[in-house]
Amino acid sequence: MIHSVYLYLAESGLPILGHYFGTDEVEMDSSLTTGMLEALRTFIANIINVESDVESISLKNHQIIYQMGGGLAIVALVDEYTEQELVIRGLAQVLKRLNKEFPDIGSAQHLGYIHTPEKEENSLEIIQEILHNGTLGNVSEVPQLVRKIPKAAVSLGMVSTTELNIAELCNGKRTLKEIAKVAEKSEPDVRNIVNKLITDRICKMVKINHVE
């Protein structure tokens, strides 16, 4: 899950906008946040003596992912389970779109760009679209059918009709919530059925990435 993103001017660290995904927003001074993130990136680059830009910094349970381009920098704070490469590509796409939509955005320090409320709204729409509202790169566990259940299993009392229907929806792509919606069942009921199918070695849980 992408928890938050920050867009700022690469040279100065001055903020353009910040956005939190979800409901865990914490009030922070954006200029202090972006300045600190840029200082951290520069500090790490100097310590390890690299000429190219630092793309990521790993913490205990989170990752800080950077992308630079067109005078801009964008940083995403993501959890440890998020697929880093997908987020890196997504952030690069965001910068590409922003520079295309607002050609003067990277020259804001020279007063060549005025960040109006309308521009901020458009920028946020681009960020939410490309980053899938914070789910880009998110790893989920979904049920996948291991072996097909013969129709006769219902008449023999081996499985119920409901269990058969749920098993057929376990295609390795749908989440439990999505299966519950299609089957018109509650999510707890679907979870219990899937757990039984897993115990009976009819289904297994697999990990999937939310892709672009």
Image: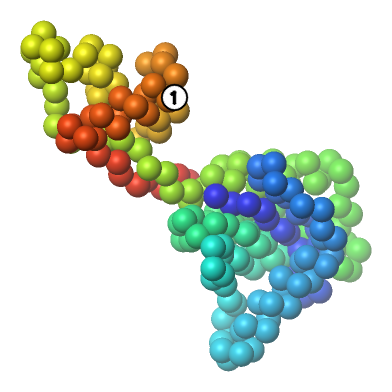
Horizontal side, residue 159 vs residue 183: left or right: left
| Residue 159 as seen in the image, left or right of residue 53 | left
Front-lying residue, 172 or 99:
172
Q: Which residue is drawn at 62% across and 59% down?
A: 77
Q: Residues within 10 Å of mark 1 (few under 14, many from 20)?
A: some
Q: Residue at x 25, y 29 (%)?
A: 196
Placement of 49 over or under 12, stated as above or below: below
Q: Which residue is drawn at 28% across and 14% down?
A: 162
Residue 186 place in picture, x, y as percent:
44, 19
Q: Position of residue 80 (x, y in %)?
A: 50, 60
Label 1: which residue? 187
Name the image quarter holding residue 47.
Answer: bottom right
Above or below for 96 versus 200:
below
Camera-side residue of 80 and 196? 196
In the displayed structure image, the side of residue 48 where residue 8 appears, left or right: right
Give percent across and percent down for residue 75: 65, 62
Q: Is residue 201 visible?
A: yes
Residue 83, relative to residue 44: is it above or below? above
Residue pictured at 44% horizontal, 24% vertical: 187
